[in-house]
Amino acid sequence: MKPAVLKILSFIFLLVTAVACSKNNDTPPVAAPKSKTIIITQSAWKIQSVGVDANKDGVVETDITMLVQACKLDNRYTFKTDGTGSMDEASAKCSDTDPQTQPYTWTFKNTETILSGTFSFSNGDATIVSMNETSLVVAYDDAATGSHLLATLKH
């Protein structure tokens, strides 16, 4: 009887070991979404388009990107985690006397729904319409024209 019990125990031991060592086929855990601070500071942004949102519904009625000077469309905006940033004129400067880079300050307001700062595309407060890894859409009132604008920035 002893050899039979030993064989059964050995088989059970091997079975338990095999099950314990099998690969887990569960899907990997979903990574937590990145914070807006991480997204905005991960790399420089460049204006892709600007449009008029006359009724302030978050939809561009008139694309005015072609009215923005080319020397402003290639500018790169870098946001740093300490609330500072810089605008780089890139290759097309509007004036030869303009500095290559200009510093600015920025902050989030109202539980990260308002982007506030002294950057040149929207001095003051801009409502964040949408933001993800590659795109930032902000809405703001342009004091010079009195228009409500939507600006889309990309990495």
Image: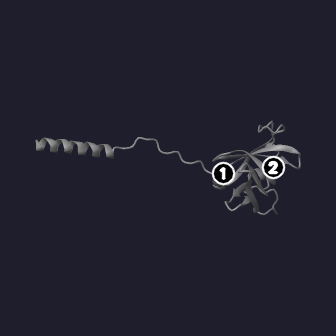
Per the rendering, the mark at residue 69 is 2
Q: Is residue 4 left or right of residue 140?
A: left
Quadrant showing the N terminus? top left
Mark toward the viewer: 2 or 1 = 1
Amino acid type at image mark 2: Gln
Amino acid type at image mark 1: Lys
- Residue at 28% x, 44% y: name it: 16
Count neighbours of disc 1 (C-alpha within 10 A) and say few if under 14, some if 14 to 19, many if 20 or more: some
- Residue at 65% x, 47% y: name it: 134
In 3D space, how far apart are the residues under numbered discs 2 and 1 (Cα atoms)?
29 Å
The reply to whether residue 79 is in sight is yes
Residue 62 in which image quadrant: top right
Q: Is residue 35 left or right of residue 60?
A: left
Label 1: element kind: helix
Depth order, front residue of 35/66: 35
Q: How far across and down, in percent of the image, does residue 41 sit?
A: 66, 56
Could you tell me how many numbered marks the image carries? Answer: 2
The residue under label 1 is 36
